[in-house]
Image (cartoon, rainbow, N blue to C red):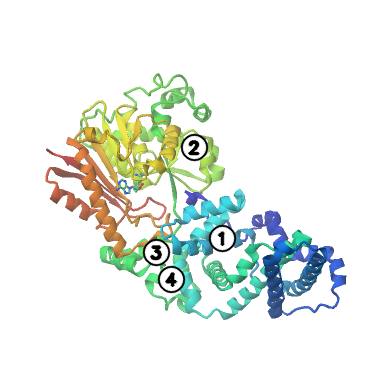
Amino acid sequence: MLATHTCKKSLSSSSLLTTTLSRSLTSRTYALSLHKNSSTSSKRTKTSKPSSPINSTSTHNTTSSTSSTTRKTQPTLSNSNLKSLEMSKTLHSLSSQEEALQEHQSIDEYPLTFSERHAISILYHYHQSLIENPSYTLDKFISNYLRANKIGKNNKEVIICACYEIEKLYLLLDYMSKKFNFDEMKEKLEISLDQYINRMNMMKMKELGPSAHLLPKSVTFVEENRKSVLHWRLVFALYKEYFHEQDFEQVVFHSNHADSVFRKIPINVLLSCPAQLFDILCEEYGEEKAIEICLINNSEAPVFGRVNDVKVIIEHKSTTTQQLGSAMTNDESRSDSGFSGSKHENITPKEEVTDILNATSEPNKDLLAPLKKKTRKFLKKLSEKYSEVVGKITPSKLSTFGFRFEKKTDFRQWPEFKEGLFEIQDDSSQYIVDELIRNGALKQITSLKPLVLDYCCGTGGKTFALAGALKGKGQIYMHDIRLEKLSSELKRRAHRLGIENIQPLEHDHSHWEKLKDKMNLVILDVPCTGTGTLRRNVELKYKINYNWIKELTKKQREIIENAIPYVRKGNYLLYSTCSILSKENEDQMDYILKKHKNFELVKEIKTLPLLNGGDGMYGALLRRIH
Ligand SMILES: C[S@@+](CC[C@H](N)C(=O)[O-])C[C@H]1O[C@@H](n2cnc3c(N)ncnc32)[C@H](O)[C@@H]1O
């Protein structure tokens, strides 16, 4: 979700310095304000010696230990003498630090902007928290962090992108930071960190005045974890030096550094791909293809949308679409989306929208062609309104309702998104729904009120993409082991997309028994390694190993066994993953076909992640013969 933010923004762009805090941390501005504000305290501390870069740390340490000692005794500080003693100590150390700071302004070669500091802080804390909670996702961690720190919109995008980019390359950056001699850089970073700590301490002391002994923990925390913070600063500096806003492949294979820096690094580390995963990819695809996949995993993930046919093509009463539609000719606007009037009156005439449900011919891509035409018309209007923000909006060549945004933005704020006229969904995921469900299973189902069970529904991605083909008929049962947690998001999303025929089914629901042998379609979008989506879930690759794959394939088989009894004779089962590993895909198909002789394979699709294209996915449609 967070990954929809742009990564093109420069980490050091001047827009980053717009917050009060970051402005006050810019060395030059800070020195100036210090000069103006500190004349009184300077007078009082004529005797204090200016410190060298090295003893500026010790000055700070003195301050810090004073404040932490004071913190411990704070409850007894009712005596006014004690208070003034404390205050004079604070002012004394404050002014000596000011002098030290002014002297060393020019040395800080690695000053950090507001966003950069937060990005480093996020990565550092995220890696710490993984020790206790290995399944914590970076997405979730960043959301929580940004909310807790009330980070504004402008800074958010830059912080998120920096975190994603660095995490993607972390194996390589970590290796470089440990194996290569970056002593000069390390030394400068150390000075920079000292200066940062000093500045923070002084700012806080000034802010707190007589209560300076209450110096916030965050600053002393940095000191206590100095080594780790320095490590992350080095990782960050290396990222900026070598990879930021540069083509990764060009840098590691073809740049001036390629020979001097990168040649000695093992290939999997160079690609920031853990050894086991790299071996698995090589085994399956050969080394050349494995390298290509890893390079794609290190590239920026494209953003695909899906035009919601439920609202845009089949029926509509949206004011936003009316606005978009008003740019069309009257004829177009009427036939394309029925932009006015009641829901049922506005279902596009049957002859115009292919009736996939009742079609009887063999699967044929052209069946979806009229829908594709309508999709393009809608996208044209969307482009006219937003091209300045998102660049080109290109219709997908693969899926019927899919399109790609050239640039990323916070689409979720657009009225068209809020009204459910489009959804964010990967192109390959849509392609599987088009080919195997819309053009496959649903076309063959004769029931006028089809029953569908989405057994691992998550927040409904696959199901919501097929819902338009049902045109409000039948029933979609939604199940997930985490249903309780997901159900509010599921309902909110369904409501936004205008889908009414869904029914969440709790695990212990009494209906389960009655549903056996009744489903026209069971969808099994099972939990998997996500090896087809690693550029979106950047931390995932570090978790993939043989053991986990073994556990997952076992779990997938259990889910298959649990769900198979619900398929009605003559009807369908869709098995899908966002993995590109045969153990989770073709091997599971072999397992089903061998164990359940009453099923036959109708069609299988596998995609690999593509630069500027869809993710790696697998889908197989099976039919229960008897
Ligand atoms: C790949 S995700 C599904 C994504 C969803 N179909 C979509 O398109 O957005 C897999 C889902 O399987 C669920 N799951 C895991 N174990 C399960 C089980 N034993 N039974 C049912 N669902 C399970 C997970 O909670 C997760 O939401």
Mark sitting earlier along the chain (2/1) = 1
Q: Which mark is residue 417?
A: 2
Tell me the kind of residue under disc 3.
Tyr
Whole-percent x, y for residue 31 in the image? 77, 66
Q: Nearer the viewer, residue 24 or 580?
A: 24
Mark sitting earlier along the chain (3/4) = 4
- Helix, strand, or loop for circle 4? helix
Q: Is mark 3 within 8 Å of ligand 1?
A: no
- Helix, strand, or loop for circle 2? helix
Q: Are marks 3 and 1 in contact (CB under 8 Å)?
A: no
Q: Quadrant of residue 471?
A: top left
- Helix, strand, or loop for circle 3? helix
Q: Residues within 10 Å of mark 1 (few under 14, many from 20)?
A: many
Q: Disc 3 marks which residue?
A: 542
Tell me the kind of residue under disc 4.
Phe
Mark sitting earlier along the chain (4/1) = 1
Q: Disc 4 marks which residue?
A: 253
Tell me the kind of residue under disc 1.
Ala
Q: Is mark 1 within 8 Å of ligand 1?
A: no
Mark toward the viewer: 2 or 1: 1
Q: Which mark is residue 119?
A: 1
Whole-percent x, y for residue 321 in the image? 49, 29
Mark sitting earlier along the chain (2/3) = 2
